[in-house]
Each structure stands twice: as structure tokens, then as C-alpha cells.
Amino acid sequence: MNRIVTGIGTLVLVLLFLPLAVLVAHAGSLTAALSSAENRMALYTTLTSGILALAVDMLLGVPLSWFLSRRLSPGWQRFWGTCLIIPMLMPPLVLGLVLAYLAGPASPVMLTNTFLGLVVAEVYESLPFFVFAAWGYLRTIPRSLEEDAWALGKTPRETFRYVLWPLAATGFAVAGAMAWARIVGAFGGPIVVAYHPSALPVQIWIILQEQGLPAALGLALWLMVAVLPLPVWLNWRYGRAER
Amino acid sequence: MLSVNVKSPHVTGQATFAPGMVALVGLSGAGKTSLFRLIAGLDIGGDVTVHGQSLASRHPWERPIRYVPQRPSLVPHKTIGSQVTWVQRMDNAVLKEWISLLALEPLWHRLPRELSGGEQQRAALIRALATDPEILLLDEALSAVDRPHRLAIWDALKGLWPRDRLLIFSTHDWTDAETWADTITYLEAGRLHAPQTARNVTPLTAQMARLMGFLGAIPLTPNQWLWLHPASLGVGAWPEAPCILPGRASVTALTPLSARYTLHIQGRTFRWTGPPRETGPQDDRVSIFQPVITPFGEENRE
């Protein structure tokens, strides 16, 4: 039994890293990918819009996940837990179409082909994942921790700062890393809403059509290099927090 | 000082407690924790007043009441020392004394997960004491502490607890209640009985009598039952005993310090182990030195 599990585990690890290996082997030169101004612009767009989208995710997702996990009765938690699956299941392409319909050229708020539109599309693709991950983590912080502090004369505000926030921060960091992965990989929404300014996934698509696979892979490798530090840092900084 | 009038699905009844040490005695599941949570304000159901003032509108952190649950939730990512300092209101010198009484110096810079169950309970106790509480509720808060430490802690509490403050501790061990409390209040199946002075407790129910160590009851009249306790039974007829009954007791020595007793009385047989004692004249009689007579018998006799 143990041997089977080890075997499957090893095989899956190899399979998971196979795309990266192919990417590195076939990407050609990293500098070549960055020689074009469009590609450099796409990298810059991805990083700036991504950081903005992540900030919005945190700004909106932290209060929402807190509300869901600490302020709702278990019955309502289950209800909203089920409901939150719907935005997560919504195909990004469909999200993009809906956004384009709502904020297209005919609407008062014009988002299509703007930087803001790109950020909004990225937020829509990533926010449900942020909330789901953060909420799942917050739910595991036992209520008795708060109650014990209250029964020692500490107000909810003091309790939050000393007891809950350090624990919750780990959850928010993990959720942030997950949201970041969704943001930088966002393709379905942006290709409809924000073909320009092109973020990396869309630019990769453009390069693939114009110059073929090797050039696209080179840019894809840059995508990996550019987006990796944030989740690695979050994981390193908060991932080891002991409970 | 503290009055409770509670009515919740888990516990009902009323009681008033004067300052001092109070034992809340009851079997597991009797509602001890429910009562403590109501008093601390963590659950609602009934009225709690302190010095005549209702606490109904006061949040747990606004009440003059501190509560240590049986399984304390120490903050997992802070050292014991940090947590104690966080809640500290007690004078530094007094706190230092408690820290050494509870033998907590070596644990001061450790995290809760590095502590055993008993050490965690000791840490939770010092955390509550450091708040300098007016009313302290201990919910079997020393149940996992090893015996030498437990006795030392109780001794210290008994000696150092201020006369004008109230400490209520729950236990299912009658000896603990008898030894450390000034007042004992009994809780059975969610019903809170009126507090009694520890020196002079009479059993209020058959279950309470058993908890107190009574062996069982024999009927004297249809409404009068005599409860038998090993400590108040004498083998043979002792002239100074207020109550002498027909019955036969036999004693088998187990060790120089203990003996096995068997008592046949009114068709019943009771067995217990106790220190060896002198037997009186007439081996077909038993003497009751401290008769406890109640209007109820052993309802649930097997």
C-alpha cells in the first residue's frame, strides 16, 4: 500500500513539473523574449495590474471572509459556502463576456480595452478563490480562543489584534498566493474585456499567433519568473506559522 | 456578592454566593460548564447580579468575572509569559509569588504546544490570576495537573485567596470540595441546589449522597431513610453511639493500614475498604455515630 502511494506521488510530481521542464528546454533565450517593446510592456502591465487586483482582492476579500466565518451562523455559512461555488465555477470567458456586455462601448462606464477593465477582469477571476481559501482557513480558528480572551477581560478589538490577526494572517497570505496565481494567469476575461493593454497571457497568445510556439514559450518563461517571487515569499513568510 | 437566577435548556435554579471559596459539585454532564458560561456571559439564559447590580447588559469582557475552562485555549502563537503580561492587572510582586507557587518559571518562555496538559492548565490558571479577578470561575481547571502540584496549588489558593473575593471551582470529587471549599453547591441534571456550608452538608438527593461517599440507605419508617457512611459506622454496639441497629459486620485485615469491611443489615450487604478500627461488644449490632436521616431513599437502587 505504502509503495503504491509513494509510486503515484512520485509520478504525479514528475507530471506536474513536466510542463516547466518543456518550457525551459524549448523557450530559447530569455533575453530574446524581452527584446520587443510589446513584450516588455506586457510584463509591466501584468505586474502593475496584478498588484492592483491583488490589493482589491485583499481589500474586499478580507472583510467578506471574516464576515462569513465569524459573523454568520453555521446554517448561513453552509448556504453561502454553496453559493460561492457559483462564481468560482463561472468560466472566465463567460465572465469576460458579461463584463464586456455591462461595461462595453454602449454603457456609461467604459471598461473595454482599458487598464481599469483589465484590473476588474482579474479581480472577478480571482476574488472568489481568495474568499474561499481565506474563509476555509478562518473557520479552523476555534471560537474558544476568542471566548477565553473575552473571559479574561479583553475586548474584541484587543482580542483581534493579539489573538486572531496573527493566526488569520497565515490564511490571508495563502489565499493571496492563490489569488495571485489566478490573476497573473487570467486569460478568458482579459481577452474579451482588455485585449489592450495586453497582459502577459494575452500577449503570449498574440505572439503564438504571430511568431509561433518557441517565441511564445520564451515569454511564458518570463511569466513564471515574474510572478513566482510573491507566492514564494508569502509561503516562506507565513506558511510555517505554527498553530 | 454574586447571585444567579438561571433558566436555560442546560441548567436552572438560583443561588447566592458570599465571598470565599465555593465548590460547584456535580457529575459529568450535570451542567457545571453551562452554569459557568452563563455567569461569565459567554451564553445567555437568566440573570446574574454582582453586588446587587445586574450584569445582563454587560459583555463578558466588561464583567468583574474571569473564567478558566477545563480545556483552556491558550493563544497558540504567544509564549506563556507574553500572554500573562497581556492580561496582567495584578501587582508584579504578587504575580511573581504566584508564578513560583505554580512552578511556572521554566515554562515562561515556552509556547503552549510545548506544554503538557497539566502544564497548560497551570498556565491558564496563572493567566486568570494575573487579571486580579474579583470573581474567578475554575471549571475543573486543575483536573490534568499532577497530584503534588495540584495539592500545592489548592493549598496556596486556600491560603492566599482574598477574603473579600469569590472563587467558584467545579469538581466531581467530593473530597476536593470538602477540603478546599467554604461553601458547597450541588448541581444535578441541570438543577442547581442551594449552597450549603461545607462543614455541615446534608445530602439533597440520592445521587449526591453517593457522591459524598455514602454506601446506601436503609428505611427506618416509610419517610425516613438512614444513610450509612463508612466513616460513621462502628462494628458492634458502642454505648456512645446515638443509633445502634441490628446487623452483622465482619472485618478482614488487608494490610496493617487497611481492612475490608462487609456489613449485612436489613437483608442488604454493603462492602467497603477503610482503616482498621476497634470493634465494640455484641457482634450482632452496628453503631452509627453520625446518623444522617433523609426523607428520600436510594431511588435508583440496583
Image (cartoon, coloured by chain):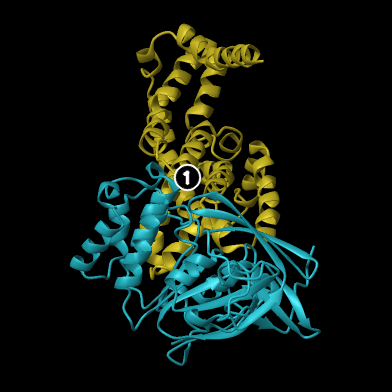
Q: At which x and y percent is residue B18?
A: 44, 86
Residue name at image x 62 percent, y 76 percent: B288
Q: Is residue B93 above or below residue A167?
A: below
Q: Which chain is yellow?
A: A
Which quarter of the image is occupied by the N terminus of chain B?
A: bottom left
Q: Is residue B169 visible?
A: no
Task: Tell me the amino acid under the disc marked 1.
Answer: Gly
Q: Count the marks: how many?
A: 1
Q: Residue A4, image x and y in percent?
A: 65, 13
Mark 1 Cα-neighbour bin, 10 Å: few <14, some 14–19, many ≥20: many
Chain letter of the cyan region: B
Classify residue A82 as left or right of residue B154.
right
Nearest the viewer among B273 and B236 is: B236
In-front residue for pair A74/B218: B218
Q: Which residue is mark 1?
A: A171
Q: Is B231 on the left-hand or right-hand side of B136?
A: right
Q: A66 and B301: which one is in front? A: B301
What residue is rendered at 35% in x and 71% in y?
A: B158
Residue A21 position in % (x across, y down): 49, 10
What residue occupies the far bottom of the structure in this picture? B52
State the image quarter where residue B189 is shown: bottom right
Q: Is residue B46 left or right of residue B132?
A: right
Q: Which chain letter matches label 1?
A: A
Could one spot residue A116 in this view of the protein? Answer: yes
Residue B35 occupies quadrant = bottom right
Image x and y of residue B11, in percent: 64, 75
